[in-house]
Image: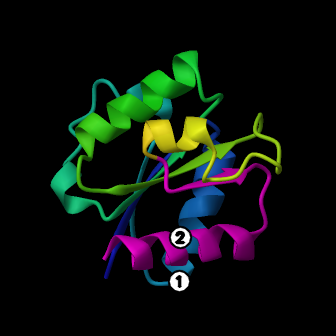
Amino acid sequence: MPTVVVIEEDSAMRTLICEWLLGEGYAVRALPAQGLATSSHGGSEADLVIVDVPDLRGGGADTVRAVRAGYPRAALIGLSTRLGRSLHSDSNPARALGLRRLVAKPCARGELLQAVADTIGAAH
């Protein structure tokens, strides 16, 4: 069973994403982004990290780098309300940060679960 870590600032969104993933049989761990720097990551145990990315520069880039450091073997999916649907996962900013996919928030359940399935499948 693949393990997915959800790092999301908004507690309601974090809970919803976790429920969706648990319903599909994934093992899930969750934490708010502000707890990222002080938590013990256990990175070797994660197959995928879904991370809230406010932007692809500045704070968002720093967050993604911290996640990458804490979970060096995990694939990464970025979620953001500030990303337009026209910014694809193959964009230069996404590739530079090592994001496998970008998903604009709010997103539909099926859209997120498909991104997870595609990413975990590509990672293994």
C-beta proximity under 8 Å, tags 1 and 2: yes
Residue 116: mark in rendering: 2
As for residue 26 lying within the magenta part, the answer is no
Camera-side residue: 58 or 113? 58
Name the secondary structure under disc 2: helix
- Looking at the image, tell me whether mark 1 or mark 2 is earlier in sequence order: 1
Q: Split into 4 quadrants, where in the image is the C terminus?
A: bottom left
Residue 33 vs 118, above or below: the answer is above
Q: In this view, does 26 lie to the left or right of 87?
A: left
Residue 24: mark in rendering: 1
> Can you give x and y, in whole percent of width and height, for residue 105 in the image?
76, 49
Residue 57 vs 100, above or below: the answer is above
Q: What is the C-alpha distance between the residues marked 1 and 2? A: 10 Å
Q: What stretch is highlighted in magenta?
A: 99-124
Residue 56 vs 81, above or below: the answer is above
Residue 121 vs 5, above or below: the answer is below
Residue shown at 75%/46% (left/top)? Answer: 87
Q: In this view, does 20 lie to the left or right of 48?
A: right
Q: In this view, does 109 lie to the left or right of 53?
A: right
Q: Is residue 59 left or right of residue 35?
A: right
Res. 52 in view: no
> Can you give x and y, in whole percent of width and height, for residue 7 in the image?
48, 44
Name the secondary structure under disc 1: loop
